[in-house]
Amino acid sequence: MYPENYRYTKEHEWVRVEGNIATVGITHHAQEELGDIVYADLPKLGANVEQGKTMGSVESVKAVSDIFSPLSGEVMEVNELLATKPEKLNEDPHGEAWLVKIRVTAPSEIEALLSAADYQAYVGAE
Amino acid sequence: MSLASQLLRTTPLNEIHRRMGAKMVDFGGWDMPVQYSGIIEEHHAVRRRVGLFDVSHMGEIEIRGPEAGQLVDYVTTNGGSRLSPGQIQYSALLYEHGGFVDDILVHKVANDHYFLCVNASNQDKDYGHIAAHNRFNATVENAGERYAQLAVQGPLAWNTLQKLTPTDLAAIRYYGFTDGRISGAPARIARTGYTGEDGFEIYVPPAEAPRIWEDVLTAGAEFGILPCGLGARNTLRLEAKMALYGHEIDATTTPYEAGLGWIVKLDKESFIGRDALTKRKQHGPSRKLTGFEMRGRGIGRDGYEIYVEGSPAGWVTSGGPSPTLNKNIGLCYLPAARAQTGRNIGILVRGQAVDAVTVATPFYKRGR
């Protein structure tokens, strides 16, 4: 369920780091808890985001939920697909429905994130 | 399992919801399904076909005796005793100051027997309120434990339910009911609902509810029936502008603010709240329940603050996406002088004012 090469937060974001670029999304567990997602409010291109701080929100039919940035850096790309197809967050949260790509400024921050196995255990126990 | 979840109240269908994979939530102290397949899909099923809801958490109060009608007329705003047996009426229990104890459905079973359907989280308060004002030759029973309630809603609700009963459902008019049988079990069959669609609410013995639930799903399979949760119930009722206690109405709100003046019969002899409402009607309500549509990106949700011309002016009572209209809609309170449709308002969404406009309600009305 949770890709081995991703790292995870307890707030249910995932991150995939390739070089100094990190792709960020929300987890399958997050989308399942939220239900039908209707809107994603994402940071602007070039915005600076900080590990553990709010960088946007995801709204489902019944609730709104903050997105916390898993790493610090600068937003290099925003997934435009989500502006017209927010439901992709329910369908493919670990793939097509990534949220943003960040140029990582503090690579060591990744040490604080959960492995797939740890995250699986965390949501399993939740 | 945590202690808190052990203390939640459950309906007779709890095991079925869990077995069928519903997502369960704590709803006002009840362990209830918020969704099965998804709120939007369930919402569309009810608008286009048929959906089945477990609403057994709702309360029932029975009033019996030679002066049952007088007690009903005294504790409610509408003219319950004027109903004919088999008729149902939307009504309210009020405090002396005119605020809502609850909004309710009054079913007249007979001249000496009334059946009230009340909100789940208000049932004990409602029962206490009615019993405390019972100076009539009538008995009041808090009967919630004796009934499970299922709602079969949607344009194909009739086709679905008719397969399970010899009662001619076409003969039951909107806001009418009859006592009959569903799947062989005794049932009070009412043509009411909280979705804005045609449909039925059936009151059955709790022990029979699981079997009836399965039978309704089987009967509706050919029509594409879906089991539905309280999430879809909320989006459906919002589109139809049906009030939800704790949101549009509460102890600080009179029927006039909420646009429910039509359930107040001031010409009745006397009822609790009558003096306060008479005054309120003379002066007119200071605030009015108003519909809005979002124009900017964002969703105005319950409790969000509203700005008109740069100043705080009111709040959102219920808001969210409308699956039928594919817009973000909501209800709000605004000062009566500023509640006209077509007015630009700002809704404070997470610290930022997002544009919205007031619109006519209901947002959705079914074709007849």
Image (cartoon, grey):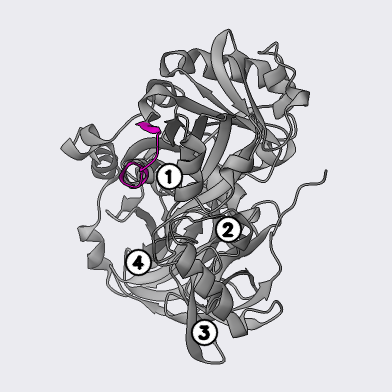
Q: Nearer the viewer, mark 1 or mark 3?
A: 3
Amino acid type, label 1: His
**Closer to the N terminus: mark 4 or mark 1?**
1
Magenta residue check for B350: no
Instruction: Report the magenta residues as a range.
Output: B130-141
Q: CA distance from mark 2 to mark 3?
A: 31 Å
- Residue drawn where x is 51% and y is 47% of the image: B73
User: What residue does disc 4 label?
Assistant: A69
Same chain under badges 1 and 3? The reply is no
- Chain letter belonging to callout 1: A
User: What residue does disc 1 label?
Assistant: A28
Q: Secondary structure at mark 1?
A: helix
User: What residue does disc 2 label?
Assistant: B264
Same chain under badges 4 and 3? The reply is no
Picture layout, residue B115 above or below residue A106: above
Quarter the N terminus of chain B occupies: top left
